[in-house]
Image (cartoon, helix red, strand yellow):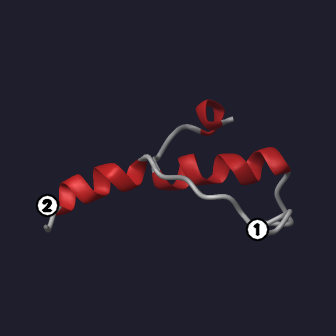
Amino acid sequence: MEERPTVVAERRRNIGFVFQRIHPFPHLTALDNVAAAPTKVLGMPKAAAR
């Protein structure tokens, strides 16, 4: 059964992932690494993501 692209995108929005490396972006702090996804993908303000 196929779903509409908007439904698929809505479901994927609530799925997270865990980095397998300790520091995916070595130039960022651990907090900035965690906050990177909501700021880039969801367009969330940096302060809210932190």
Above or below, 4 against 32 in this view is below
- Is 8 placed left or right of 30 in the picture? left
Residue 47, x across and y down, in percent: 65, 32
> Considering the image in quadrants, where does the C terminus appear?
top right
Q: Residue at x 30, y 57 (%)?
A: 9
| Left or right: residue 14 compared with residue 28 | left
Q: Mark 2 highlights which residue?
A: 4
Query: Is 27 situated left or right of 49 in this image?
Result: right
1, 49: nearer the viewer? 1
Label 2: how many Cα within 10 Å (few below 14, some 14–19, many 20+): few
Q: Is residue 42 left or right of residue 31?
A: left
Q: Residues within 10 Å of mark 1 (few under 14, many from 20)?
A: few
x and y percentages locating residue 45 in the rendered image: 55, 37
In this orientation, which residue lies closer to the viewer: 18 or 37? 18
Q: Secondary structure at mark 2?
A: loop
Q: Residue at 79% x, 44% y: name it.
A: 31
Looking at the image, which is closer to me, 17 or 42? 17
The amino acid marked with disc number 1 is Gln
Q: Which mark is residue 43?
A: none
* Badge 2 amino acid: Arg
Hey, which quadrant is residue 49 in on the image? top right
Q: Give the image quarter of residue 8.
A: bottom left
- Say which residue label 1 marks: 20
Question: Eyeballing the image, is 2 above or below 10?
Answer: below
Residue 23, x across and y down, in percent:
84, 63
- Dot 1: what SS? loop
User: Residue at 30% of width from left, 49% of height from top?
Assistant: 10
Give the residue at the far front of this rendering: 1
Precedes in sequence: disc 1 or disc 2: 2
